[in-house]
Amino acid sequence: MHISARLPQLGYGLGLRVEYYQELLEHPQGVEWLEIVSENYMVPGGLPLVWLERFRERFPLAMHGVSMSIGSTDPLDEGYLSRLAALACRIEPAWISDHLCWTGVQGVNLHDLMPLPYTEEALAHVVERVKQVQDRLGRRILLENVSSYVSFADAQLTEWEFLAAVAERGDCLILLDINNIYVSAKNHGFAPLRYLDGIPAHRVQQFHLAGHEQGEALIIDTHDAPVASPVWELYAEAVRRFGAVSTMIERDDHMPPLAELLAELAQARALAEPLLRNAA
Amino acid sequence: MSSLQALQQRMAQAVLADKPLQLDDIRGDTSADAQARLSIYRHGYRARLRDALASEFPGLRCLASRRFNSLLDRYIEAHPSTHYNIRWHGAGLAAFLDYAHPWLQRRELADMARLDWAISTAFDAADEACVAPADLASIPPERWASLSLQPQINLQILMLSCNADAFRRAADQSGPRPHLRRFKHPRHLLVWRQALAVRYRWITDDERQLLGSAARGETVATLCDRLAGLSDAEQAMPRLATLLHGWLEAGLIQSWSLDG
C-alpha cells in the first residue's frame, strides 16, 4: 500500500495570462486557483510583480516553469534555481512544477520541451537531478509529461514507465497533462489508456487540459485551441483513476475571451464532479 | 561523454542546423519519417525566437518594416540562444546590427534595437525609492550646496543617431510610420521608469554630464561649478535649478544626502 505524497487539492483553475489580469480580479467566477509561468515573474521588479501580488492576495498560486531542463546533461543552472527559489519564497506557492524534458545542452537553449530517450541511463540521470532540485528548493516538485514528436531507437521503457519511475525513485509528484498524453499517443501510436494505467495514482498532483492542432502528419501541441473531445474523454478516464486532482485549463496563444475559458473550466467541473461523487 | 550527452548534442545540432540533418537516433514510421518529426523542433526553435524578439522590438519592426523578419532570421541563425528566458536573446540584437552586413550600413537599425531593449529592461528593472520635491522642502537654503542627489541606478542614457523614439511611439500607439530623421551629430536619450511606467526623453549634453556627476555623488555646489564651466556662468544656477526640479518631478532621483 502506498502512502499518498499528494499536496492539498486546489480545485479548478486557470493559467494566469496578461490578457486576463483585470477581468480575473474583477470577475473570478469559478476560478479557484491560478497557475503562473514562473519565468514571467523571475524579474527584479516592476509591473509583473505588482500584478502578481494582487493575485496572490486573492487566489492560491502554483508555479509552473519551462526552463529547469531537468533532463539536460548540462549542470543544473544555479542562477535559475536561485531566482526560482526567491520567487517561491516571495509568493509561497502551493507547489512548483516543470517538465520532464531537457531544453538545451552545451550552454545553448532550444526553448522547447525536448523529449528524453526512455533509457535506464536517462532515468538515473533525471532521478539524481530531481533529488538535487528538491534539496535546493526544500520541497517536492511536480514534473509534467510533455508532448513529443520524436521517439528514440534505443528506448528501453515506455514513456509512462519512465515517468512513473522518475516520480517513485525521485520522490516527486506528477503533473499529468491530459492533452499531451493524447498528442503523444497519436504521434507515436500507443493507447492513451495504457498510459493512464501505468501512472501511480498517489503521485498525481495536477492535471493540465489544453488544445492542440492537427498538423499534416502529426498532432501539434499548440495550446491555442479549445480542449478537444477525445481529450475530455481521456480526462474523465483520468478522474476515474486518480480521483480529485487539481485541474487547470492551459491556454497560451489565440487567447479567447475569458468567458470561453471559464466555460471550459465549468465543463471540467461538470465532468469530474459526478464521477467523484459516484466514486465516493 | 555519456551516451545521453552525446544524443542531446546531436539533437541540438540538428535543431540548430540551417539544413535538415539525418539523425539515426530517431525512429520514423508510416505517419511521419524521422526527418519530418525532427523538423517540428527545428521550425519551433526559430518560430519561438522570432515571436519573442518581435514582441521585444516593436520599434525595430516599425523601422525595418518588411526587412524585419529576415533581419531576425539572420540574427537567430548567427547567434544560438543561451539564456533560459527566451526574451533575453534580445540582449545581443543591437550589437549584431552594429557589425553584421548589410545592416551595419544602416546605423538607425542598431539605434532602434538599443532603444527597444532599454525600454524592455527598464520595464521590470528592480524597484527603487523615488525622492519627490516635497522630500527636500525641509532642507535650509544654506545647506543646498552640500546636497547630493543620487539618480536611479536603472536609468539608461543612449547615444542615438536618429529619431528612434518616434518609431517606438508610433509602434506603441499603432500610429503611422514616421519619417526617418538622421541627426548630424548623435543625441542622447534618457530611458527610465517612473513608478511603473517606462519613460524616455531627449536630454541635452549638459544634463547628461550632470547626471553622470550626480551618480558619482558630487554635491549641488560641484554640479553648479561644472555647469558654469560648460556654458554661461551667470546662467549656471537657474539652469541647475531647472534641471534638478525636472529630475525630481520625473522620479529620476532615488536618494539624497547632505555632506558634513
Image (tube, coloured by chain):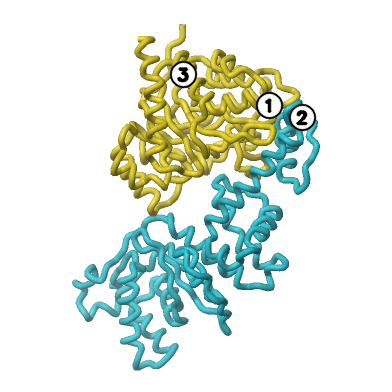
* Quarter of the rendering containing residue A52: top left
Question: Which residue is labeled 1 in the image?
Answer: A117
Q: Among all residues in the image, which is located at the extreme front?
A: A229
Question: Which residue is labeled 3 in the image?
Answer: A236
Neighbourhood count class around disc 1 (C-alpha, 10 Å): few under 14, some 14–19, many 20 upward: many
Q: Residue at x 69, y 67 (%)?
A: B99
In the rendered image of the structure, the colour used to display chain A is yellow
- B131 and B19: which is toward the camera: B19
- Please indicate whether residue B27 sits to the left or right of residue A182 in the image: right
Q: CA distance from mark 3 to mark 2?
A: 36 Å
Subunit ID for the residue under disc 2: B
Do discs 3 and 2 belong to a common subunit? no
Subunit ID for the residue under disc 1: A
Do discs 2 and 1 belong to a common subunit? no
- Are discs 2 and 1 less than 8 Å apart at CB? yes
- A172 and A278: which is toward the camera: A278
Question: Which residue is labeled 2 in the image?
Answer: B25
Neighbourhood count class around disc 2 (C-alpha, 10 Å): few under 14, some 14–19, many 20 upward: some
Q: Mark 1 or mark 3: name the one nearer the start of the chain.
A: 1
**Residue B212: x %, y % from top left:** 44, 74
As drawn, the chain in cyan is B
**Residue A92: x %, y % from top left:** 36, 35
- Are discs 1 and 3 less than 8 Å apart at CB? no
- Please indicate whether residue B54 sits to the left or right of residue A39 in the image: right
Task: Indicate the quadrant containing the C terminus of chain B: top left, top right, bottom left or bottom right.
Answer: bottom left
Choose mark 1 or mark 3, whichever is in front.
3
Q: Residue at x 50, y 63 (%)?
A: B118
* Quarter of the rendering containing residue A146: top right
Which numbered marker is on residue A74? none
